[in-house]
Image (cartoon, rainbow, N blue to C red):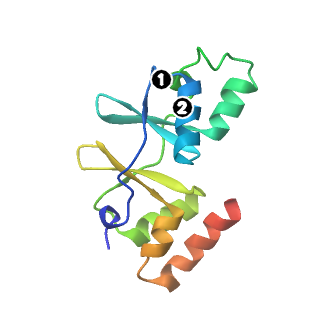
Amino acid sequence: MQIKDALSQDVQYANKTTSIVQVAKLMEEHDCGSIPVGENDKLVGMVTDRDIVLRCIAQEHDPLTMTAGECMSEGILYCFDTDKVEDVLENMGEQAVKRMPVVDKDKNLVGIVSFGDLSAACENKACCGEAMEDIREAA
């Protein structure tokens, strides 16, 4: 099974000029802990709840004026919509991440896939078991 068959297409995203307050409101509204950041239809970063705490609040920046571009993590992990579920789950386990943006061949954001999405879709439970355990331990 490919990732495009398991991903969530209802992805909330911000642009680099979106305020951190707006990003936090998106997280609250959609009950998620990370928001992808896009620019010209391309994925350029990710803001997590941890980023907000460490890069904004702990550094005493004003969340009303700090932007997603100033707070985001760059060089983020992503997968392609044509990747196999087992391969992405293994990568997520190795990197200890619980969600990953999904892009198409042109690197346009098409969705996001979570640990829960993949564990439900994993066809080879024995193969995916170790990766799932790695992600659970990182939580």
Going by the picture, which residue comes out furthest to the front?
A: 29
- Position above or below: 89 against 57: below
- The CA distance from mark 1 to mark 2 is 7 Å
Amino acid on which disc 1 is placed: Thr
For label 2, the SS is helix
Q: Residue 96 carries which label?
A: none
Q: Residue at x 63, y 67 (%)?
A: 134
Q: Which residue is drawn at 67% across and 24% down?
A: 56
Name the image quarter holding the N terminus: bottom left
Q: To which residue does mark 2 refer?
A: 23
Pointer 1 and pointer 2: residues touching (CB < 8 Å)?
Answer: yes
- Position above or below: 28 against 54: below
Percent coordinates x, y for residue 5 in the rendering: 31, 67
Percent coordinates x, y for residue 38 in the rendering: 38, 32
Density class for disc 1 (Cα within 10 Å; few <14, some 14-19, many ≥20) is some
Percent coordinates x, y for residue 139 in the rendering: 68, 59
Amino acid on which disc 2 is placed: Val
Percent coordinates x, y for residue 104 in the rendering: 27, 50
The one nearer the camera, 118 or 18, is 18
Q: Which residue is drawn at 32% across and 35% down?
A: 42
Residue 23, quarter of picture: top right
- Position above or below: 81 against 57: below
Residue 80, quarter of picture: bottom left
Tag count: 2
Q: To which residue does mark 1 refer?
A: 18
In the displayed structure, does residue 96 sit left or right of residue 121? right
In the displayed structure, does residue 126 sit left or right of residue 60? left
In the displayed structure, does residue 96 sit left or right of residue 53? left
Q: Which residue is drawn at 64% across and 20% down?
A: 63
Density class for disc 2 (Cα within 10 Å; few <14, some 14-19, many ≥20) is many
For label 1, the SS is loop
